[in-house]
Image: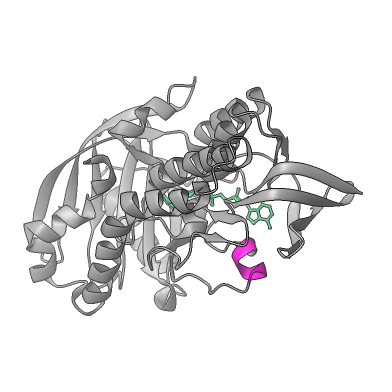
């Protein structure tokens, strides 16, 4: 069976759903597919967004609490405090609200549906659904398929450099309005975090992939340490993890009528690991570019998309990627983390919001 659509979107995380909202709102026929059974689940996220993203967190049940500052525990035990205003969200509810908006705007969303083949020369994708296979002929394809991007793989593009993570959700024993991060020789090429969300907290650890075999022991040790301080409880109500791209933007964001967005484009901040904001912004922009190209015959729309996204993210992301490479050698030294400029780069969630 062959389906024909203006825009096919692979992946319905924040990037794909935001693209679907914009493209459907502009009057295009949009099909979004995701291999998951339910939007947003399983959650693979610490669930922090910077304050300016609050406008995307207005749906019922999304906003969990406000965050004031960040405490960085340096290797020597010194604690550095920084302003770090933001919001903790229920990430599944956040993704579901965006997807709901996309459907309201007229996008067709199919779950349990996985891209299995891509013929970019013919602009045809094969999708395996719960009831069989369909071929979808598209005018534009938006790759919003996350850090391992099967679309990029099908196009023969290189894999992205990633950090691997492990996270527990644990009870929080007192009200907490800061996020905590720990730098330690025990966390090579990464850091541990505690992000509070009401009576619970996300306690996690990200390590460079080559050290990632050994993640349970250091995370369990931190959990025990915080239990001994009576900050968190023992019960782990949720376990998750996932990959975070840390190498910077893809060389090209538009290839063969395919627009890369979010993690699939390498837009995640290579030091903090933050990517929700970039996913929403790039997804929305890709949907708008599709409308300009297909509805308004704007032949420069795809180039403009690439240029806009690079303008917004490239400097911040590549600086952080470079800084990460440099830190590879110094990651756990007191000197590196005691430097206020360096600490600023941890919270450089977005330079993108500075403009
Ligand atoms: C443990 C962890 C903690 C994090 N914490 C934060 C945080 O606190 N704040 C923050 O801003 N960022 C955080 N991030 C990063 C953030 O989660 C990502 O940047 C964000 O999810 C990117 O959105 P996306 O839409 O690009 O990709 P994703 O959210 O990864 O969505 C990709 C979608 O593509 C689908 N897909 C993949 N392959 C196929 C296929 N073949 N066919 C169909 N569908 C497919 C997947 O099922 C998925 O739903 C964290 C990441 C991890 C792993």
Left or right, 229 with respect to 216, comes to left
Q: Residue at x 52, y 38 (%)?
A: 288
Most common secondary structure along the magenta stretch: helix
Of residues 216 and 233, which is closer to you in this image?
Answer: 216
- Is residue 21 part of the magenta span, yes or no? no
Q: Is residue 73 visible?
A: no
**Residue 318: x and y, percent?**
30, 64
Left or right, 201 with respect to 35, comes to left
Left or right, 93 with respect to 178, comes to right
Of residues 186 and 232, which is closer to you in this image?
Answer: 186
59 over 108 or under it: above or below: above
**Residue 71: x and y, percent?**
17, 48
Of residues 169 and 209, which is closer to you in this image?
Answer: 209
Of residues 349 and 252, which is closer to you in this image?
Answer: 252
100 over 229 or under it: above or below: above
Left or right, 124 with respect to 202, comes to right
Quarter holding residue 38: top right
- Is residue 154 part of the magenta span, yes or no? yes
**Residue 4: x and y, percent?**
80, 44
**Residue 102: x and y, percent?**
61, 30
Q: Is residue 329 visible?
A: yes
Highlighted range, magenta: 151-155
Q: Residue at x 40, y 47 (%)?
A: 278
**Where's the C terminus, which quadrant?**
top left
How many numbered markers are drawn? Answer: 0
Quarter holding residue 153: bottom right
Colour scheme in use: one colour
Residue at the farthest right position: 1
177 over 15 or under it: above or below: above
18 over 248 or under it: above or below: above
């Amino acid at each position: 069976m062959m389906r024909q659509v203006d825009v096919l979107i692979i992946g319905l995380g924040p990037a794909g759903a935001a693209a679907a909202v914009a493209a459907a709102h502009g009057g295009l026929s949009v099909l979004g597919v995701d291999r998951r059974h339910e939007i947003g689940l399983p959650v693979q996220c610490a669930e922090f967004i910077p304050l300016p993203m609050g406008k995307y967190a207005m749906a019922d049940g999304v906003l969990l609490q406000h965050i004031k500052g960040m405490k960085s525990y340096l290797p020597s035990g010194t604690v550095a405090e920084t302003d770090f205003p933001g919001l903790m969200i229920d990430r599944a509810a956040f993704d579901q609200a965006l997807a709901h908006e996309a459907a309201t705007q007229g996008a067709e969303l199919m779950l349990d549906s996985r891209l299995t083949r891509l013929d970019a020369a013919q602009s045809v994708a094969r999708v395996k659904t719960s009831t069989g296979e369909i071929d979808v002929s598209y005018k534009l394809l938006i790759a919003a398929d996350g850090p391992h991007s099967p679309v990029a793989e099908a196009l023969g593009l290189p894999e992205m450099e990633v950090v691997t993570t492990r996270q527990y959700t644990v009870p929080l024993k007192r009200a907490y309005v800061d996020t905590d991060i720990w730098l330690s020789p025990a966390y090579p090429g990464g850091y541990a975090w505690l992000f509070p969300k009401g009576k619970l907290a996300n306690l996690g650890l990200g390590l460079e992939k080559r050290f990632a075999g050994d993640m349970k022991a250091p995370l369990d040790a931190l959990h025990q340490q915080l239990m001994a301080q009576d900050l968190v409880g023992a019960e782990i109500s949720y376990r998750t993890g996932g990959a975070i791209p840390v190498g910077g933007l893809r060389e090209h964001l538009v290839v063969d009528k395919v627009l890369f967005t979010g993690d699939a484009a390498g837009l995640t901040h290579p030091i903090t690991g933050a990517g929700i904001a970039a996913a929403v912004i790039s997804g929305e922009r890709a949907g708008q570019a599709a409308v300009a190209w297909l509805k308004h015959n704007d032949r420069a729309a795809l180039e403009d998309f690439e240029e806009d996204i690079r303008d917004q993210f490239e400097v911040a992301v590549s600086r952080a990627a470079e800084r990460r490479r440099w830190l590879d050698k110094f990651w756990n030294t007191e000197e590196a983390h005691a430097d206020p400029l360096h600490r600023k780069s941890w919270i450089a969630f977005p330079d993108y919001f500075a403009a």
